[in-house]
Amino acid sequence: MIITKKEPFLEKEIQKLGEEFETYIKIKKKTAERVEEIFRKKQKRGILAKIRAIWHNDLITIEDVKKDIRHFTESVRINRYLFMLREYPDLLDDRTKRFIKKAYYLADEDVQKRIVEAKLADYDMLTGLYNRGFFVKKLDEVIQKRQESLKYKEEHELEKYEYDREKIKSFADFILTHIHYNMKHLRIDLSPHPFSTYIGKGDHRITMRPKDNFAKTYSSTMHEYGHALYDIQTHEDLHYSPIGGGTSLVIHESQSRFWENFIGKSKTFLASIYEEMKRINPEIEKYSVDDIYHYINLVKPSPIRTEADEVTYHMHIIIRFELEKAMIEGKIKVSELPRIWRDKYQEYLGISPKTDKEGVLQDIHWSQGSIGYFPTYSMGTALSALWKKHIEKELGKIEDLVKTKEGIRKIQDWLKEKIHQHGSAYLYNELLQKSTGENFSAQALLDYLEEKYKTIY
């Protein structure tokens, strides 16, 4: 059932978030006024002494903060503490600094209890930015399972063919027209790094990185479409609200990885676009759909994450996870990254990037401050296998559905009803429970990979 304007939860959530947003604006305004007042009196009294007087203490301790903060969204004082943390860190002991950071980024019920009892590492604060509720312990467990399941294979002769970049771009246009029901919603262009962006309601844009290798460009196009579809199918009442768009990047990446792997790499879907493949390179006619299927699903280490196959892909995430966690914990320096990156790739994948461009500089995430983002790709991939499992329970095998546009539309409608339409109204675990009745597990992905690749190889 698709939600409507009359559904109670929607109106309630929008009203609640609207009230919280108004409160937030008032808090920001009061904080700014208070800071301005402090600085106006700076000449009469030392600024540090004045701030100390506000809390009636010479040194702010974690006990002081705990008394003030019951919940991030309910307390004006967290904003003052953030100001202190930024401008006058010498007034806070180290333990208090860590507490304030976590209280801000892990805005969950009973923040204080979670922090004290779980004794979260600093890296958790950053992963919490992209998916509230996931922590290092769970990431370690899931990634360890992935690492144990990875195997590598030889190259495929179809890799050697060269493709005209203009034809590859036109093929990407064809793919979107083939799978999407209204091309007025989106467009595709070229960029050095593939991405998806939401401009506004009805205006969604994705980009592709033109490569001579057809399979790599094809996979990234399917991936970015999954992101775009999530935004496109958010309920119309949420588009200009605080809860429009994806609830977390794990959910978002589960959508992109779903389309990239379960749709784009399925044999029956490849059969449905086989004739168009031959148009971009007549040499493909020498190969059967089975050959193309093996080519698209080739398991082979690559230095580039976005071009990796669905098995070795997770080694790229493991490497980044280990490096950024070590950086945050102070175990390695940024200047050491290029060397350690090459060592890790040699150790985990048996290859080493030729340049930093195809090595440590290949992603945009760290350069824009997105530390803690990468694990969402692996977590999202595991989650996408759960979506597949439940779609097949309700609609039938995906291999059968993707044979026709009607079948693809059924998949899109299922994703809209269960996931997309809700925007950010639910937290990760709430949405997962509401959609599937299950808790997160990587087992569905591991089962899928084992079943698929033991038949291919």
Image (cartoon, grey):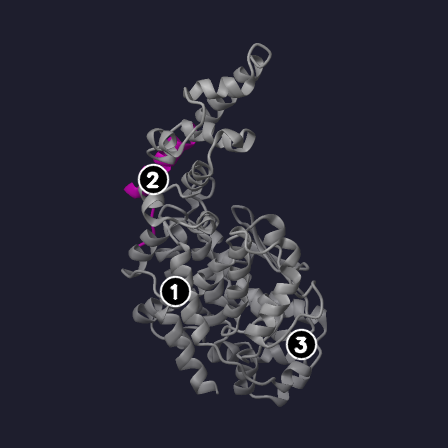
Residue at 45% across, 76% down:
403
Q: Which amino acid does the dot numbered 2 rest on?
A: Gln
Badge 2 marks a residue whose secondary structure is helix
Q: Is residue 7 magenta?
A: yes
Q: Residue 383, can we see it?
A: no
Badge 1 marks a residue whose secondary structure is helix
Above or below: residue 39 compared with residue 230 = above
Q: CA distance from mark 2 to mark 1?
A: 25 Å
Of residue 293 and residue 178, the one placed in the foreground of this image is 293
Which disc is residue 112 wearing? 2
Q: Which amino acid does the dot numbered 1 rest on?
A: Glu
Q: Is residue 128 magenta?
A: no
Q: CA distance from mark 3 to mark 1?
A: 43 Å
Residue at 51% across, 46% down:
201
Residue 212 lies in quadrant:
bottom right
Left or right for 66, reference 182: left
Which disc is residue 63 wearing? none
User: Which of pointers 2 and 3 indicates the residue nearer the eye?
Assistant: 2
Q: Which residue is mark 1?
A: 141
Q: CA distance from mark 2 to mark 3?
A: 58 Å
Above or below: residue 429 compared with residue 109 = below
Q: Which residue is mark 3?
A: 280
**Label 2–label 3 contact, CB within 8 A:** no
Left or right for 373, reference 206: left
Task: Specify few, some or many for label 3: CA neighbours under 10 Å numbering under 14, 14-19, or 20 or more.
Answer: some
Task: Specify few, some or many for label 2: CA neighbours under 10 Å numbering under 14, 14-19, or 20 or more.
Answer: many
Give coordinates of residue 324: x percent, y percent. Answer: 54, 56
The stretch in magenta equals: 1-22
Give coordinates of residue 200: x percent, y percent. Answer: 54, 45
Residue at 57% across, 51% down:
197
Residue 157 lies in quadrant:
bottom right
The furthest residue to the bottom: 286
